[in-house]
Amino acid sequence: MMMSYGMFVFGLDTAAYQELQRASTWRQEAQNRVGRRPARQFLGPGDDTITLSGTLLPQFTGGQQNLDELREMAQQGHAWPLIEGHGTYYGMFVVTTLNERKSRFMRDGAAQQIAFDLTLERVDEDNVSLFGQITPTTLQAITRLV
């Protein structure tokens, strides 16, 4: 297991990513002053964004169904915990963007290569109404993966 997002497990047989990018911001608001640089006031954390990029080879690794599962999780609008395989807990995240690019097509139109970029945004853990729940459909998807 490379990483888990809620009950979705990133790995060679699902959606292995080759790159993880993380961008964190902090809110430092400026107050203009006459004849001097603006004064800064720290207002707290800003956005925390993680982008996972990878390429699926459906004949050997995970395929379109795995991206469809991530798309379904995004459609629900819930936040899920993001945990790396070695135990690093990043926090609760929502999916904001899922891009895919298909190439190297077979005669029937099936892609032999699917590149993807998944963008996740962190949400505060005090808004429990955003948190995802394990439903029977999610449970079926989990058992399908294991």
Image (spheres, rainbow, N blue to C red):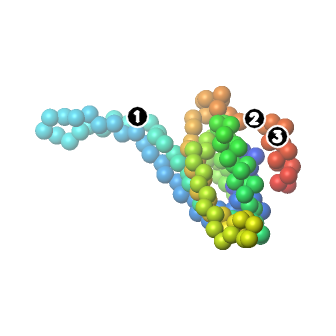
Q: Position of residue 58 (x, y in %)?
A: 75, 66
* Residue on which the image places disc 3: 137
Q: Amino acid at mark 2?
A: Gln
If the image is split into quadrants, where does the C terminus sit? bottom right
> Which mark is on residue 43?
1
* SS of the residue under disc 1: strand
| Residue 133, numbered circle | 2
Q: Image check: 68 left or right of 35? A: right
Q: Residue at x 80, y 42 (%)?
A: 138
Amino acid bearing label 1: Leu
Task: Give the label on residue 86, or none.
Answer: none
**Image point 85% across, 52% down: which residue?**
144
Spot the residue most to the left: 35
CB contact under 8 Å: marks 2 and 1:
no
Q: Quadrant of residue 116?
A: bottom right
Mark toward the start of the polypeptide (2 vs 1): 1
Left or right: where does residue 113 sit relative to residue 13?
left
Distance of label 1 from label 3 (alpha carbons): 40 Å
Residue 2 image-quadrant placement? bottom right
- 10 Å crowding of disc 3: few (<14), some (14-19), many (20+): few
Q: Percent from the top left, x then y, of residue 142?
A: 82, 48
Label 2 vs label 1, nearer the camera: 2
Mark 1: give few (<14), some (14-19) or many (20+) Cα within 10 Å.
Answer: few
